[in-house]
Amino acid sequence: MRKNKNKPETVDTSSVSEAEELNVPRKKKKKTGLVVFLIILVLAVAGAAACYFMERQKPISTTRNYLENVQAMNFDGMKNLLQSNDMSALDNADITSEAYTNFFKAINQKMTFEIRKTKFNIQNGTATVTAHIKYIDGSDIYKEAVTEFFQQIASSAFSGETTTAEETQKKLAALLEEKSGSVADKFTETDISYPLIKADGKWKIVSLDDETVKIMSANFVNVQDEITQPLSESGTSDSSATPTSDSSIDMTTDKFAIHYTSCRVTNDYAGNPCILIYYDYTNKNSSPSSAMTDVRLQAIQNGQTLEITLPAEDDTSVDQFISEVNPGQTVNVCQVFSLKDKSDVTIQASDNYAIGGGTVTSQILKVQ
């Protein structure tokens, strides 16, 4: 039998279709599974990185909040961010005194800071955040306040006026507040590294450090003690000012100059021996002032500070010591001290306004 050439041959495609149906879905499933795995992996890595980044920001945020509370003088806010909850570092400062609140608030509001560096250990739950802080150096403010404070005290003493400790503190606080608004700002910059610890899920600064207290007090830890110290004539001498045989109390500052002239021994108003010390005082201030206001003179005998007294007879130079003189004027003044015996007397002179002591000059006087 002859085959029909016009009749198309039939091909069995069942096996091909079945293979395609079997193979194609298998390839798609494998490819889709890989993509899903990669997406999950990327999301997991990104999530872990985001979590680490967010956790790393928490100690930085704590430090920033802490310094903002320092700026605002918010002691409760600072305490809440301290792991120790201990604010005793402020005990020896006048920052918490209500009398000086307005002054210190005005000072600390001008403080600025910038977070510079962070060390972070997520396993140990510790971190160290370093802040660059720019703050007010109050030395010029204190200097101006001290000048006027002593002038007012000297004027009150000369007129016989007495003031209570509370009134004196208020006067001093008012002067500090006034000068903080009139004296040009002088800034100091420093870096402080704050250690932090994670406790109960919260990041906190370990403790209140002395450097932060110094910043808050504008480089001046105890206002009243430092400023009123020259008013007290008792205490120990400055051992750093050891006199020699030819040394003198002569000194010159931008406010005054003194030059030793003589001394003599006589009796005081009670009949006890005393020594009268004479020196020339020149007022270099731009306003009237006095030796009582500007100069701190101590007399030491056998290691003990001698007490101030008054001579039995009138002496014009003693009056000149407490009298105000005009700028550029020079007068001879006298200060009188009780004697304990006839041994040598060491006298020390310094600037009443000098914060932290300043320059001290000394001289040995022969009593006999």
Image (cartoon, rainbow, N blue to C red):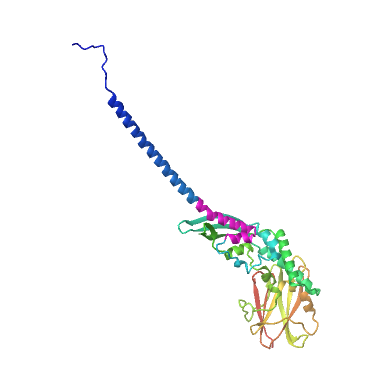
**Is residue 26 placed above or below 267 in the rendered structure?**
above
Q: Determine the residue located farthest toward the left in the rendered image.
A: 1
The front one of 93 and 77 is 77
Could you tell me residue 179's position as x and y percent?
A: 72, 62
**Is residue 290 placed above or below 20 in the rendered structure?**
below
Could you tell me residue 316's position as x and y percent?
A: 80, 79
Could you tell me residue 322's position as x and y percent?
A: 77, 75
Could you tell me residue 28's position as x and y percent?
A: 36, 34
Quadrant in which residue 365 is drawn? bottom right
Quadrant that contains the C terminus? bottom right
**What stretch of residues is rendered in magenta?**
54-81
Quadrant that contains the N terminus? top left
Q: Residue at x 76, y 71 (%)?
A: 153
Please tell me how many numbered marks the rendered image carries: 0
**Is residue 313 placed above or below 92 in the rendered structure?**
below
**Is residue 119 placed above or below 344 in the rendered structure?**
above
Residue 116 visible? The answer is: no
Q: Is residue 251 magenta?
A: no
Q: Residue at x 61, y 59 (%)?
A: 77
Q: With 197 as the anchor, is 328 left or right in this view?
A: right
